[in-house]
């Protein structure tokens, strides 16, 4: 009787895909925060993240000794994010769900725009509001992609492991996944409040701290909170993929 090698041949591919997905997520988060921390340490003056946005670390004029650290970290993080979406889609197909998971294209678009915002930063400065537009598109793609993937993952987890939540799985998944949009909403509200009520403040800076402006009105504060949330979501989604794959493997073996 001729042995069947088809199943065994597919197992290493699945294992590599699981490992690569998790590695890409952790390397991306590590690259981003490593670059940010190194750039902040080389900032020529005090860097208070509560009142100073990410763009300060990326500016060659404001941070000549450290901007390359931030730029490199963001590019590596976005590249790892693109790789992660590819591995995520592969794992989705291996589970037999079919189709492309919701949010993958938005994440790919967001990561691509983030790379463009860094690599083409000098060229974008020649276009009116060019850098701001591409940065907003990048954050929009990342946030929409993360929220949609998190919603889908939480819903499937509730349906798989917690039968009592079957009737409200979509509602609970929407609430938990929507937490990523909360700091972005607060950032928009804070910026609108400052623009209409406190127009003399201009753009956020350390002068706000000297004038005693509350930190919750700072766009920079909510921008950094959003970065933390997106990083956490990326790691959670990667670990959730590992757990789901392990559960599927156990089910197949039994």
Image (cartoon, rainbow, N blue to C red):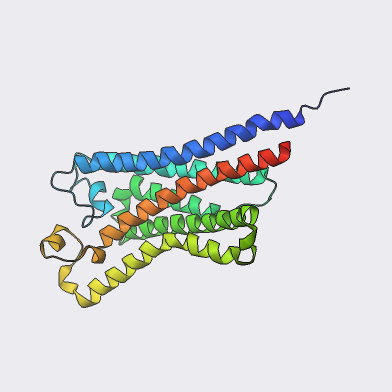
30 relative to 110, above or below: above
The image quadrant of residue 253 is top right
Q: Position of residue 160 (x, y in %)?
A: 64, 53
209 relative to 94, above or below: below
Image check: 14 left or right of 47? right
Q: Residue at x 24, y 73 (%)?
A: 195
Q: Residue at x 51, y 48 (%)?
A: 237
In this view, the residue in front, 55 or 249, is 249
Q: Position of residue 106 (x, y in %)?
A: 51, 55
The image quadrant of residue 242 is top right
Q: Residue furthest bottom?
A: 197
Q: Residue at x 64, y 57 (%)?
A: 159
Q: Residue furthest left?
A: 210
124 relative to 65, above or below: below
Image check: 108 left or right of 59? right
Image check: 86 left or right of 7? left
Residue 109 in view (yes/no)? yes
Q: Residue furthest right?
A: 1
Residue 131 in view (yes/no)? no
Q: Position of residue 175 (x, y in %)?
A: 49, 64
Quadrant showing the N terminus: top right
Image check: 143 left or right of 124? right
Quadrant showing the C terminus: top right
Q: Residue furthest front?
A: 164
Q: Position of residue 13 (x, y in %)?
A: 64, 32
107 relative to 91, above or below: below
């Amino acid at each position: 009787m001729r042995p069947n090698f088809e199943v065994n041949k597919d197992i290493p591919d699945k294992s590599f895909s699981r490992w690569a997905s998790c590695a890409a997520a952790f390397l991306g988060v590590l690259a981003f925060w490593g670059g940010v921390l190194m750039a902040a340490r080389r900032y020529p003056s005090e860097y208070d993240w509560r009142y100073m946005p990410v763009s300060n670390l990326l500016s060659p004029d404001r941070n000549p000794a450290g901007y390359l650290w931030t730029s490199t970290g963001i590019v590596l993080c976005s590249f790892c994010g693109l790789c992660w979406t590819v591995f995520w889609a592969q794992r989705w197909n291996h589970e037999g769900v079919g189709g492309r998971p919701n949010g993958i294209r938005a994440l790919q678009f967001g990561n691509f725009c983030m790379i463009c915002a860094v690599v083409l930063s000098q060229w974008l400065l020649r276009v009116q509001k060019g850098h701001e537009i591409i940065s907003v598109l990048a954050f929009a793609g990342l946030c929409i992609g993360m929220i949609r993937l998190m919603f889908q993952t939480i819903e499937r987890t509730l349906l798989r492991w917690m039968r009592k939540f079957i009737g409200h799985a979509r509602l609970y998944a929407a609430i938990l996944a929507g937490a990523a949009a909360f700091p972005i909403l607060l950032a928009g509200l804070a910026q609108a409040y400052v623009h209409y009520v406190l127009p003399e403040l201009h753009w956020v800076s350390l002068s706000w701290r000297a004038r005693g402006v509350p930190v919750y009105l700072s766009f920079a504060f909510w921008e950094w909170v959003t970065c933390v949330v997106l990083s956490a979501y990326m790691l959670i989604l990667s670990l959730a993929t590992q757990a789901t794959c392990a559960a599927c493997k156990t089910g197949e073996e039994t």
